[in-house]
Amino acid sequence: MTAMSEPKAADVKKLVNDAAASGAAKTQKLIGTGAAQAQMTVEKSMDQASKATDGMMKAAEQAAEFSRGNAEAFTKATQVYFAGVQDLSKQTMALMQGLSEHAIASAKALSTVKSLKEATEIQTSYTRTAIEKTMSEATKLQEASLKLVEASFAPISARMTLAVETMSKPIAA
């Protein structure tokens, strides 16, 4: 009986070794396949994360550039406005100076009158000239003011147009 148990033990040992080798090979293959799939998944995730980061960086750069353009537009609008207000002030001062000089000349003329009729004519002439000059200059000031408003808002309007155009474009992938 001992002779029979030895071949059986050898057979069992061989079966165990074969099973272990086969199991090890299958396990090695599963580990290799799993590792390859995990590596592909990690690489794909890293690629997607990299693309997403690049997209966010590009969007942040575009937003910063757009904001910089907005600041420049507001600066330009402010400069145009203050330069225009300064010009309007000079025109207004010139008008006031002209009217003052005209009033002084009229007062001098009134001081030399010899009759009430002459005084009335000088006063009427002064008033007519002052009103005509004031109306003419007021119209010029009004036109200059409207041009100033248009010029002041031009940079801001251009930025608004650009903003609408930018926002109406689809986001690039």
Image (cartoon, grey):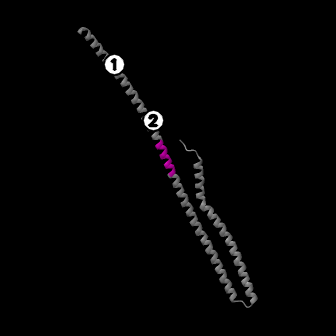
- Amino acid carrying mark 2 in the image: Lys
- Amino acid carrying mark 1 in the image: Ala
Q: Which mark is residue 45?
A: none
Q: Which residue is the site of mark 1?
A: 19
Between 17 and 74, the one lying in front of the other is: 17
**Quick check: is 158 in the magenta stretch?**
no
The quadrant in which residue 113 appears is bottom right
Q: In this picture, is 111 found above or below 152? A: below
Residue 123 image position (x, y, % from top left) = 72, 84
Q: Secondary structure at mark 2?
A: helix
Q: Nearer the viewer, mark 1 or mark 2?
A: 1
Q: Are marks 1 and 2 in contact (CB under 8 Å)?
A: no
Residue 77 image position (x, y, % from top left) = 57, 61
Residue furthest to the front in view is 1
Between 159 and 126, the one lying in front of the other is: 159
Q: Secondary structure at mark 1?
A: helix
Q: Residue at x 64, y 75 (%)?
A: 95
Q: Residue at x 45, y 35 (%)?
A: 44
Give the Cα separation between the discs numbered 1 and 2: 37 Å
Q: Which residues are magenta?
A: 52-63
The quadrant in which residue 145 appears is bottom right
Left/right placement of residue 1 relative to residue 155 reads: left
The quadrant in which residue 152 appears is bottom right
**Quick check: is 61 in the magenta stretch?**
yes
Left/right placement of residue 66 relative to residue 3 reads: right
Q: Which residue is the site of mark 2?
A: 44
Disc 2 crowd, CA 10 A, few/some/many (<14, 14-19, 20+): few
Magenta: predominant secondary structure element? Answer: helix
Q: In this picture, is 75 found above or below 97? A: above
Q: In this picture, is 14 found above or below 92? A: above
Residue 122 image position (x, y, % from top left) = 72, 84
Residue 140 image position (x, y, % from top left) = 67, 69
